[in-house]
Amino acid sequence: MLVAPSILSADFGHLATDVIAICEGGCDFVHVDVMDGHFVPNLTIGPVVVEAVAKAATKPLDIHLMVENNNFFVELFAPLKPEFISFHIEEEKHPHRLIQKIRSYGIRPAITLNPHTPPEAIEFLLEDLEMVLLMSVNPGFGGQKFISSVLERAKRLKQLIEKRNPACLIEVDGGVNDGNIKMLEEAGVDVVVAGSFVYAHPEGVNAAISALK
């Protein structure tokens, strides 16, 4: 299992320290949630802060856009050379064009699906994607309860991926912990995003990442 801790749950007063901690603790990616206050009712961070995260990180960035103007934000964050940029299918009128744009920057394109969006909505985009992110909470805030229907959605998505693009990864974000990680693995999930479980773990981030792996 690949683990991408979400810095949304980090202490922003000591952000560099918290980013270094997860990288040294064995994470695979550093998950960065970008929210614009329009697509979701929350504002998070812009390129100045993400640039600081990129400097502190020794693992690749996984940037998750929760925004209305995807093109603008892709151009904003592309210079930071993250491993992935994911955007919400619910917000994008021309997803294939945006996928091509992300790839043109040398970044691996990914699409995110809200809890109500069926995997079939992106079946004919799978061949062009590197990853699909399934939300297991409603996007916008950390610390929410895991929506268990993501397990069925992951299984359905896995079937589509095996038919269309077996190399495409499945990522799940929201309420992930050591109590549901095994079920996620059995559903075909490759990457998990975990924020509060990692940063609030009583034994520290190393123990949390190790438990998920």
Image (cartoon, rainbow, N blue to C red):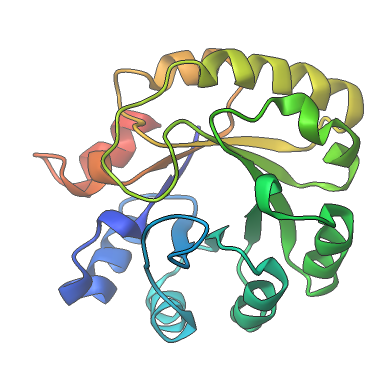
Q: Nearer the viewer, residue 107 or 87?
A: 87
- Rendered location of residue 14, percent (x, y): 18, 74
* On screen, residue 135 above or below 23: above
* On screen, residue 90 above or below 166: below
* On screen, residue 171 above or below 83: above
Left or right of 93? Residue 127 is right
Q: Which quadrant of the view contains residue 198?
A: top left
Quadrant that contains the C terminus: top left
Q: Residue at x 65, y 55 (%)?
A: 87
Q: Which quadrant of the view contains residue 45?
A: bottom left
* On screen, residue 127 above or below 149: below
- Rendered location of residue 81, percent (x, y): 64, 75
Left or right of 193? Residue 122 is right
Task: Count numbered badges in the picture.
Answer: 0
Left or right of 79? Residue 5 is left
- Rendered location of residue 195, percent (x, y): 31, 46
- Rendered location of residue 84, percent (x, y): 64, 59
Q: Residue at x 37, y 53 (%)?
A: 6
The residue sitting at the left extreme is: 202
Q: Nearer the viewer, residue 210 or 16?
A: 16
Q: Nearer the viewer, residue 94 or 14?
A: 94
Left or right of 202? Residue 183 is right
